[in-house]
Amino acid sequence: MRQKQLPYFFIIFLLIVSFSENIYAQQKKNFTIIVDAGHGGHDSGTMGNKKYKEYEKDVALKVALKFGKLIEDNMKDVNIIYTRKSDVFITLKERPNIANRKDADLFVSIHCNANPKSSPNGAETYILGMHKNKANFEVAKKENSVIFLEDDYSLSYQGFDPNSVESIIALTLDQERYLEKSLLLASLVQKNFTSSTPLKNRGVKQAGFWVLAQTYMPSILTELGFLSNDKDAKLLMSDSGQNKLAKSLYNAFKEYKKYWDDQTVVGNDLSFESGLNDVGAVVAVETKTSEAVEPKEAEKVNSLESPVSYAIQFTISRSKLKDDSHHFKGLKNVNYYKDGSIYKYIYYENPSYSEVTSKMKDVKAKGFKDAFVVAFRNGERISLDEARNR
């Protein structure tokens, strides 16, 4: 019996629909995350204690792959790239280079901690910055010292010395534009570690990591726990423990991605700091909580009659910049407000939200691609939702 063939026009219709769906799927995959499993190959990282003998490189890779698999299975609009998927050596220099070449939106480096003493325990997550204490410096030194395993490291790293405070200071220059978003993700990671694992929360910290300093995007380095501690090591080396750690990282990323999506949808006008407030992050990273605009700084923010005003926040700094600073790239009449120990710089203050957003293209044309709109009431920073619902 002869089978009926589909009408020609219907076949064409199906092909068009299929092609359109493929194009849409490609267009929708507009967020790229780099998952970096620390160490690898002849660089073993730290080693567990006598009871639990496993290398940092192995734990980091297992958690990284589990974390990535969760993203692959559940977030089809995310493009995930691994710096390594097997036990191979990747130079410290190449890790951020991979992220930069792919024009990634986020960089997550996964490691394990260790200490000569067995008592220190818990998870901590780092963003780039000057270390607040000797312990932070030691962690950065440990991770940066990988360069000594490379041939011609003195040439490749242009004289960078992991043991030198001066070298660390140089790393932190020109990276502050990513500080807020990095801080948001780091805070979300620590929050999820605390709620989903028995790990002690050691907080969000700052230190001078080469791998974070060389990325041109928000970046974090998380230390999952201490392989030198019996309790932590048992969790880190078990399949169930690694699943919990991977799920915690995934949940943190999912929350971060929501803020990113919201910001993208509304044209970059949602402050990532609203997310910081949600998770109780500390603006000064180590000890200080977020403060309201100080009275003397509030005078610097506009004093228009309208109780609510808007402005474009385009950069931040840990020290006060001069009015004609080259960091402003020619933007004039720049103001600032202070949040904890951070100076946050704003441009074009105005009571009209639409007028402020119309100036966004001018700010981005200067190179401030991560600029966003912020709101104030009587000189104090408020959320955009609160401002619009006044």
Image (cartoon, helix red, strand yellow):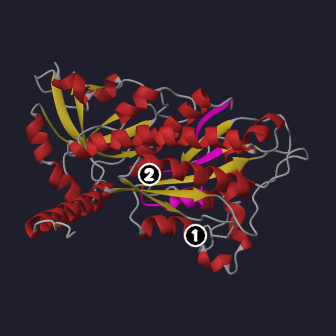
Quadrant of residue 313 within the rendered picture: top left
- Of marks 2 and 1, which one's residue comes earlier in the chain? 1
Can residue 213 be seen? yes
Does residue 155 lie above or below 379 as drawn? Answer: below
Query: Is 211 a magenta residue?
Result: yes
| Residue occupying the point 65% across, 56% down | 61
Q: CA distance from mark 2 to mark 1?
A: 17 Å
Question: Can you see residue 339?
Answer: no
Q: Quadrant of the N terminus?
A: bottom left
Location of residue 366 with respect to 176 vertically, above or below: below
Compare residues 368 and 21 and report the one nearer the observer.
21
**Mark 1 lies on residue:** 93
**Label 2 SS:** loop
On screen, residue 241 versus residue 3, left or right, reads right
Task: State the residue in front, 158 or 112.
Answer: 112
Task: Identify the magenta region.
Answer: 200-223
Disc 2 target residue? 218
Q: Position of residue 215 (x, y in %)?
A: 47, 61
Q: Residues within 10 Å of mark 2 (few under 14, many from 20)?
A: many
